[in-house]
């Protein structure tokens, strides 16, 4: 673990040097293909960084911040799009917005979630209890259904929200600007569009829409254009998660995770088309019913396609164990 920590530090030192280069050199090159060519070596570097690690925790951090978000942000920056455009006034700001899962809030933001103040401490407490139960080997004493329906989804959601909200809180103070929310109570979603749009990691959703949905959809508002853009966005997300799974296990991909995102992409697109149709506008579903249908679909498809692949590679178990050791 000590060698991994040293290597982890060296990777981020190298990444910082590369992003400093992007701030001073490519930013002065004309947007488009010329700037993209000047940034490609940095993207390749970010892409190969995870192969130097065996720790699931470090691989997850690097693939999320560098291989995933870092590359996507820099590519969008090549075309004067994304969270790095307009160019931050300071190098420190550019580094933060490149590496960290944060994005400046727009000038005319949509209404943000106003969750009661007790909600976040409650999530921290639940996460702490789950970590303690993990250390005591609870898994063998719990029903399988409870593991798939409750425990594994909470393991995926709670640590991620707690970590991202902590980062957002700290850098809102450090940078002195408002940042986009990282989650908006996704367990309250009343549709797939609601779940994957404003509720589940909206900062990443915004990146994916900028990189795939809007370019492929173009100016057309036809159902076909929206379907193609939405399908490509979910496919790209699925392939990235498949890559992350491969980095952590180095096992031949089963493509279950990709199928999970493709299925959600098709169903989300179909949901959007139905809502726009005359039938969808005439026939409305009660919020409690639509919530129940949405959560059932998300949980069942997670248990069917997503969790089997990552638990087969023992990613969750190793991640939790390493998280406990590091913290």
Image (cartoon, rainbow, N blue to C red):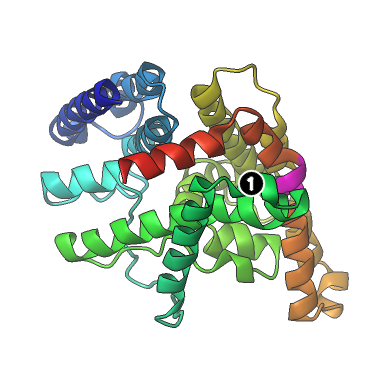
Q: Position of residue 35 (x, y in %)?
A: 28, 28
Residue 266: in sight, yes or no? no
Whether 301 is among the magenta residues is yes
Identify the residue shown where x is 55% and y is 33%: 315
Question: On the image, which quarter does residue 95 sit in?
Answer: top left
Q: Main secondary structure of the magenta part?
A: helix
Q: Determine which residue is flagged by label 1.
A: 139
Determine whether 95 is above or below 315 in the image: below
Q: What is the quadrant of residue 306 in the picture?
A: top right
Q: Residue at x 39, y 44 (%)?
A: 324
Q: Is residue 307 above or below residue 197?
A: above
Left or right: 132 as drawn, with respect to 143? left
Q: What residue appears at the point 54 percent right and 58 percent down from the top-left corner?
A: 200
Instruction: Identify which residue, 255 or 132, lies in the foreground.
Output: 132
Q: Can residue 105 be seen by looking at this rendering?
A: yes
Within 10 angstroms of label 1, few (less than 14), some, or many (20 or more) residues? some
Please provide the residue range marked out in magenta. 300-304
Give percent across and percent down for residue 77.
32, 39
Q: Quadrant of residue 4?
A: top left
Is residue 205 shown left or right of residue 277?
left
In magenta segment, residue 124: no
């Amino acid at each position: 673990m000590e060698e991994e920590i040293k290597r982890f530090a060296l990777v981020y030192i190298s990444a910082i040097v590369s992003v400093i280069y992007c701030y001073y050199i490519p930013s002065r090159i004309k947007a488009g293909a010329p700037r993209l060519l000047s940034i490609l070596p940095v993207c390749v570097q970010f892409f190969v960084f995870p192969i130097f690690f065996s720790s699931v925790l470090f691989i997850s951090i690097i693939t999320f911040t560098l291989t995933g978000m870092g590359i996507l942000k820099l590519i969008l920056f090549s075309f004067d799009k994304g969270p790095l455009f307009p160019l931050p006034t300071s190098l420190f700001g550019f580094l933060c917005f490149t590496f960290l899962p944060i994005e400046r809030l727009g000038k005319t933001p949509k209404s943000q979630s106003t969750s009661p103040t007790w909600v976040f401490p409650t999530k921290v407490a639940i996460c702490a209890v789950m970590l303690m139960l993990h250390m005591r080997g609870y898994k063998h004493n719990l029903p399988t259904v409870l593991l798939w329906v409750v425990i594994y989804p909470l393991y995926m959601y709670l640590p991620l929200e707690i970590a991202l909200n902590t980062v957002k809180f700290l850098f809102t103070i450090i940078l002195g600007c408002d940042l986009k929310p990282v989650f908006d109570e996704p367990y309250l979603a009343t549709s797939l569009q609601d779940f994957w749009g404003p509720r589940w990691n909206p900062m990443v959703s915004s990146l994916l829409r900028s990189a795939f949905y809007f370019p492929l959809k173009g100016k057309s508002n036809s159902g076909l254009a929206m379907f193609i853009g939405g399908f490509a966005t979910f496919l790209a997300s699925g392939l990235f998660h498949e890559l992350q799974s491969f980095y952590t296990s180095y096992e031949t991909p089963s493509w279950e995770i990709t199928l999970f995102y493709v299925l959600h992409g098709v169903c989300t697109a179909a949901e959007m088309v139905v809502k726009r149709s005359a039938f969808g506008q005439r026939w409305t579903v009660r919020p409690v019913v639509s919530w129940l249908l949405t959560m059932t679909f998300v949980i069942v498809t997670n248990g069917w396609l997503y969790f089997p692949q990552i638990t087969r590679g023992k990613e969750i178990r190793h991640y939790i164990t390493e998280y406990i050791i590091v913290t």
